[in-house]
Structure formats: structure tokens, C-alpha cells
């Protein structure tokens, strides 16, 4: 190909969307991908790519609200007021501040339907997920074939039109000219060979830092040792996109100390072996004790907080304990996605022995819980208010005695699906520096773009990559024509 004028880092939803959009705008694009060809696509390749949308035309009803509620910490009211003004009139410190920018969120919601229709032009088909969880507040859609289908469709479009993907190539540093504009990337190829890729724009779509033990420990803390990647794609996300942008003064955004947590079976070797059955029973730690409300609300809106509580327990592990009657639900595939059978015993003592926890403690915990279960009408598909009384922690819904052997248990740890910390951007996905100014020639999309605080807005990660990748690519191409 001719010398590229746009360099894209990353080959998942964000990077490939950026590459195709820039190419459509007339740019000559090269994509740098750390993985070999057979594993290209990062996290996107291994995910179901759930989308928080009612249809290809509408995002969920609470889309922008969820981001607003989880926009940051205790924000200064005077700055929040400033953010209500036109963006051109924001003071520089507000433009660089770490919080979920309402204009970025609004752009996200507005451009999501347009992006799905854009993808349909490459043969991607979308379908509604009827039962993603037993209890769900917001709808979900997904591409037919999941994230793998997205990667293959976008890569085929890009390569058919002359795009080049450099595999086994990892970006290491950004190159700037004397005016401060980003004009390329220093990278490392096979056998540690140093490489340079020059262009008039660089788009960082290379994920978060789940695969970097040093960054995980530095930002998330020592308990990150107990986290396991939800998929093999996480291991390719080393955080260089974030680190090399911060190194030239980019402003951080997103909650660097947190992550998207999902409850997973540590025995499984498949991608995404989630365990969502715990609300039907109880969760106990290695001491045989309950430690959290297992049924605080709809599973799709509460599992992350419960999973972080699991990570805080001794050894970062807990066990969902039920009897086989409680484990019988209408849609078992929505609550257990592990291929490994649960532990099972006719007695609680026998179950405790398999779990290597104290039998007396487990028996006492179950007895106290059973005694606290109230009466009422059970409804697995909705919050039924069937709660415990006189016990702490309380269980708010689906509280039924564990009393009919055989007893079963699933081990659960917190997976890490993605990290929250990333780079501050404008609605066009242009990276902003610590002074609130745009860094010319630099864009970020996907998890390299920081937007999440405290609680993940479910089913928006891949969508964020697709939307802001497309916007970044299109804006970069327009800049070349200016």
C-alpha cells in the first residue's frame, strides 16, 4: 500500500471501526495489532458483544441517566453548573477534568443507532436477547455471531479495500512534531524489532490495561491478584495506549481504581463462564459466613457490586450455596454459563469438605439464614420482596430456605472484563491534554477512552468502541482533507 496517513492501534471493535471509517473518508490506514492474525480482535473477539439498545434505532431508556448517576465522585456543584453551558465556554480545567462528560455521553447515545446501521452495511445482523438475565431492567441486543462476527466483518471490509493490518506489532510511544501534534507511533515488532509508523493522525483503540500486572497493581491495588480475565483477549491489553498518551500530557478520565466485575467460575477454561445463580441461594466466604445481600435488585444492575464484594473476601473467592430445588429455574442457561458441574453433597458437612471450609460454620450460617426467611410469593423473574428478617446482611429478594438435599455450590471469583481508567476526549474522540486543549492528531476510542465511574453501564463497552471508533476515523479523515 501507499504510505499511510492514519495509524490505528488495536484491532478490536474500536480499532477496526476507526480504520474502516477513516478509509471510507479517503485516508490510507495501517492497523497495528499485538496479537497474531488467528487471535486478532482483543476482547471483542471473545465477547457476546451485548448492546444496551431496545432496537437498532433506540438505545435503552436509562442510557444517559445511568452515565449521569455514575459520572464521577462528589463533583463540585459550581463545575457541574459550568458543564451545563455550551462546551466552547467551558473553562480549561473543566475540559480536562476527570468525569463523564455529558456531551460525550449525549453523542454516544445519539450515534449508537447510526453506527449499528453503518455496520449493517457490512453484513452484520443484530438480534434481540430475550432472556439475558433472570431479572433484567434494560433490554439487550447483540450481533449475530457475537464479537467474532464484528471483527470478521470489519476486518474483511478494511482489507478488501486495501487496508493493511500489521500483526505481532505493539505500539510503545507516540511521536510528536515541534508543534506538539502527534505524527506517528514507535512500535515493537517480532523479535523485539523497533519500528516507526508515521502519519497525520493516530487513533488509539487498543483497550485498557487488564493484561498488565504492573498497571493493575498500581491502579487497582494488590487485590487485583485475585482477578481473572474474562477472556483471553484481555491478555493482549497491556495499557500502552493509555500510558503513552499520558506520557505526552493527555488528561486521564474514568475510574482508574475500578473495573467491570462479573461473577465467574474459576474452574472453567471457556470465555465468559459467568455464574448468575447466586440470588437463588446464599453466598458464603472461605470462613463459611454470608457477607452480602444476594438479592438487592435486578441481576443485570446489581451483579457488579456483589462481585466486587466477592473480590474483597479472603482469597478473593466465595461460594453460591443452594439446594437442587432452588437451582431449578426457567432459563438455566441465563444463570450458569460454566461447563463445569457444581459441587454436590447430600449433607452440608459433605459440601463444606469439598469446598474446604469449616462444616460447623457453614451449617450454622445456613440454619440462621433459613430461620430468617419470611413468607410470601416467590417470583424468579421480578423483585418479589421475599426477604429475610432479623439477620445481617439482609437478603432483599428471593429468600427461600436451603433445606432440600442434595446441596450444591458453585465457586465464584471476580473476573475483570475491562478497566475503567482511560483518556479524556471530546465528542469527536479527540484526546484532550491536562490544560484542556486538544492534542492535534491524537484520538482514542473503546476502553482506551475513559468514561466509566463506580458502576459500569452494562452492555455499552463494545458499543462505545464501535461508536467512538467510527467517529474518530471519520474525523481523522476530514482533518486530512482540511
Image (tube, rainbow, N blue to C red):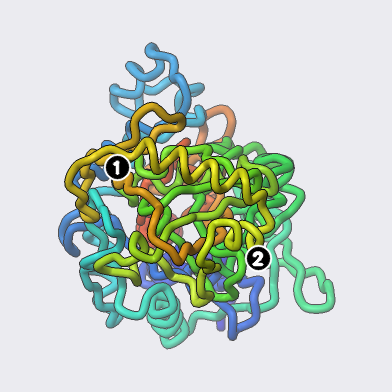
Q: Position of residue 357 (x, y in %)?
A: 66, 52
Q: Position of residue 451 (x, y in %)?
A: 45, 42
Between 80 and 359, the one lying in front of the other is: 359
Q: Is residue 375 above or below residue 91?
A: below
Above or below: residue 233 compared with residue 370: below
What residue sits right under mark 2 in the picture? 235
Q: Nearer the viewer, residue 202 or 326?
A: 326
The residue at the point 28 percent across, 55 percent down is 52
Spatial CA distance of label 1 from label 2 is 37 Å
Q: In the rendered structure, find residue 397 and report the number of the disc placed on it.
A: 1
Name the residue nearer the viewer: 209 or 34. 209
Q: Nearer the viewer, mark 1 or mark 2?
A: 1
| Residue 86 visible in the snapshot | yes
Q: Is residue 8 visible?
A: no
Which residue is rendered at x = 23% and y = 40% of the image? Answer: 375
Query: What kind of element bears circle 1?
Result: loop
Mark 1 in CB contact with mark 2 (< 8 angstroms): no
Q: Residue at x 26, y 53 (%)?
A: 135
Residue 31 horizontal side relative to residue 52, left or right = right
Furthest residue in direction top, as rendered? 78
Amino acid at each position: 500500500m501507499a504510505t499511510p496517513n492514519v495509524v490505528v492501534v488495536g484491532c478490536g471493535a474500536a480499532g477496526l471501526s476507526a480504520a474502516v471509517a477513516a478509509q471510507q473518508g479517503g485516508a490510507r490506514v495501517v492497523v497495528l495489532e499485538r496479537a497474531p492474525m488467528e487471535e486478532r480482535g482483543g476482547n471483542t473477539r471473545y465477547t457476546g458483544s451485548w448492546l444496551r439498545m431496545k432496537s437498532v434505532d433506540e438505545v435503552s431508556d436509562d442510557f444517559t441517566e445511568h452515565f449521569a448517576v455514575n459520572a464521577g465522585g462528589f463533583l463540585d456543584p459550581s463545575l457541574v453548573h459550568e458543564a451545563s453551558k455550551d462546551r466552547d465556554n467551558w473553562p480549561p480545567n473543566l475540559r480536562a477534568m476527570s468525569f463523564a462528560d455529558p456531551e460525550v455521553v449525549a453523542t454516544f447515545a445519539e450515534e449508537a443507532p447510526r453506527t449499528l446501521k453503518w455496520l449493517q452495511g457490512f453484513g452484520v445482523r443484530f438480534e434481540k436477547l430475550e432472556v439475558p438475565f433472570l431479572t433484567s431492567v434494560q433490554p439487550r441486543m447483540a450481533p449475530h455471531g457475537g464479537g467474532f462476527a464484528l471483527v470478521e466483518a470489519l476486518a474483511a471490509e478494511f482489507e478488501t479495500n486495501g487496508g493493511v493490518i500489521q500483526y505481532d506489532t505493539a505500539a510503545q510511544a507516540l511521536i510528536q512534531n515541534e508543534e506538539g501534534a502527534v505524527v506517528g507511533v514507535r512500535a515493537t515488532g517480532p523479535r523485539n524489532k523497533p519500528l516507526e509508523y508515521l502519519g497525520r493522525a493516530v487513533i488509539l483503540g487498543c483497550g485498557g490495561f487488564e493484561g498488565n500486572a504492573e498497571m493493575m497493581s498500581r491502579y487497582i491495588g494488590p487485590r487485583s491478584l485475585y482477578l481473572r480475565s474474562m477472556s483471553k483477549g484481555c491478555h493482549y491489553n497491556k495499557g500502552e495506549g493509555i500510558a503513552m498518551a499520558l506520557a505526552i500530557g493527555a488528561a486521564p478520565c474514568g475510574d482508574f481504581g475500578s473495573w467491570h466485575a462479573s461473577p465467574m467460575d474459576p474452574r472453567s477454561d471457556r470465555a465468559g463462564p459467568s455464574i448468575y445463580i447466586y440470588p437463588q441461594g446464599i453466598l458464603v466466604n472461605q470462613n463459611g459466613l454470608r457477607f452480602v445481600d444476594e438479592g438487592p435488585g435486578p441481576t443485570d444492575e446489581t451483579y457488579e457490586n456483589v462481585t466486587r464484594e466477592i473480590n474483597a473476601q479472603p482469597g478473593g473467592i466465595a461460594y453460591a450455596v443452594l439446594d437442587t430445588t432452588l437451582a431449578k429455574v426457567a432459563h438455566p442457561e441465563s444463570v450458569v454459563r460454566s461447563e463445569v458441574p457444581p459441587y454436590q453433597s447430600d449433607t452440608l458437612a459433605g459440601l463444606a469438605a469439598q469446598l474446604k471450609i469449616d462444616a460447623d460454620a457453614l451449617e450454622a450460617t445456613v440454619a440462621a439464614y433459613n430461620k430468617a426467611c419470611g413468607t410470601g410469593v416467590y417470583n424468579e423473574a421480578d423483585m418479589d420482596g421475599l426477604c429475610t428478617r432479623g439477620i445481617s446482611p439482609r437478603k432483599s429478594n428471593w429468600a427461600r430456605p436451603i433445606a432440600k438435599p442434595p446441596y450444591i455450590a458453585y465457586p465464584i471469583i471476580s473476573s475483570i472484563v475491562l478497566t475503567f481508567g482511560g483518556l479524556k476526549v471530546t465528542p469527536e474522540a479527540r484526546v484532550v491534554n491536562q490544560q484542556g486543549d486538544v492534542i492535534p492528531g491524537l484520538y482514542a476510542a473503546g476502553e482506551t477512552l475513559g468514561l466509566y465511574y463506580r458502576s459500569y453501564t452494562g452492555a455499552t463497552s463494545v458499543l462505545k468502541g464501535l461508536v467512538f471508533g467510527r467517529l474518530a476515523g471519520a474525523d481523522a479523515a476530514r482533518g486530512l482533507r482540511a
